[in-house]
Image (cartoon, grey):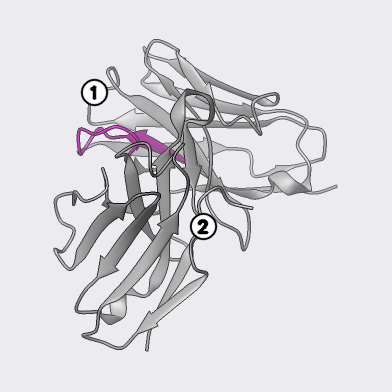
Amino acid sequence: QSALTQPPSASGSPGQSVTISCTGTSSDVGGYNYVSWYQHHPGKAPKLMIYEVSKRPSGVPDRFSGSKSGNTASLTVSGLQAEDEADYYCTSYAGTNTHVVFGGGTKLTVL
Amino acid sequence: QVQLQQWGAGLLKPSETLSLTCAVYGGSFSGYYWSWIRQPPGKGLEWIGEINHSGSTNYNPSLKSRVTISVDRFKNQFSLKLSSVTAADTAVYYCASNGIAVAAWYAFDIWGEGTMVTVSS
């Protein structure tokens, strides 16, 4: 069982927006602004999409955005495109004992 | 642009020790932490642990008793050893950098290509 809770699946039609949630506790998501999101296509290495809750690395489209409220972080994908279909994982710093926790992943399907 | 190249044995028997190495090319090795992350078949990602250039380590508490991460700062390499493996350790293992490209903490921004490690008798 993963430390962070994500919905197992999400879906949307091309052009629509989808939001994926990532729920933790005050010891991880709620306690630090070190939440990041990864896109993972099967057979490839994961790709950093969002870091420090809402920052985008160079080259990541601004269709991807992140936010946090309390113990829940969210990834929103706007203007869905076929290539956005992938697994998405959240992760958070969780203090000096646990350090890093991952979510269980969400499979995003573009209908 | 930093690149990570990883290698190691892909097939192990139960009770053996998993050994993987990751080399860092094209960027500074010091000043950052370097992580190992794995994904069992059909399951999610799991952080294994990290090390910096001076050898300071942090481990996932659930694996800490079996994991050793070491560094060779002269070769810009870091390595993972996982002892007493079982079938549950079958996974794709990735090395990754912590924030070297985005200058941030706990952002795994550069990844190796992954190594499939299978534990089977």
Q: Residue at x 39, y 10 (%)?
A: B54
* Location of residue A57 in the rendering, given as x and y in whole percent from the top left corner: 18, 49
Q: Secondary structure at mark 1?
A: loop
Crowding at mark 2 (Cα within 10 Å: few <14, some 14-19, many 20+): many
Which chain is home to disc 2?
A
Q: Residue at x 66, y 34 (%)?
A: B62
What is the distance, in whole Å, between disc 1 and disc 2 at their CAs?
35 Å
Q: Which mark is residue A5?
A: 2
In the displayed structure, A46 sits above or below B5; it is below
Dot 1 amino acid type: Ser
Residue B109 is left or right of residue A9, and the answer is left
Residue A45 showing in the rendered view: no
Of helix, strand and loop, which mostly describes the magenta segment?
loop
* Location of residue B69 in the rendering, given as x and y in whole percent from the top left corner: 54, 22
Dot 2 amino acid type: Thr
* Location of residue B111 in the rendering, given as x and y in whole percent from the top left corner: 37, 44
In the displayed structure, A77 sits above or below B57; it is below
Q: Nearer the viewer, residue B61 or A85?
A: B61
Q: Which mark is residue B1?
A: none
The residue under label 1 is B28
Q: Residue furthest right?
A: B121
Residue B111 is left or right of residue A97, and the answer is left
Residue A102 showing in the rendered view: yes
Foreground mark, 1 or 2, reads 2
Q: Nearer the viewer, residue B51 or B24?
A: B51
Q: Which region of the structure is painted magenta?
A: B95-109
Q: Nearer the viewer, residue B62 or B37?
A: B62
- Please identify the quarter of the rendering in which residue A82 is found: bottom left
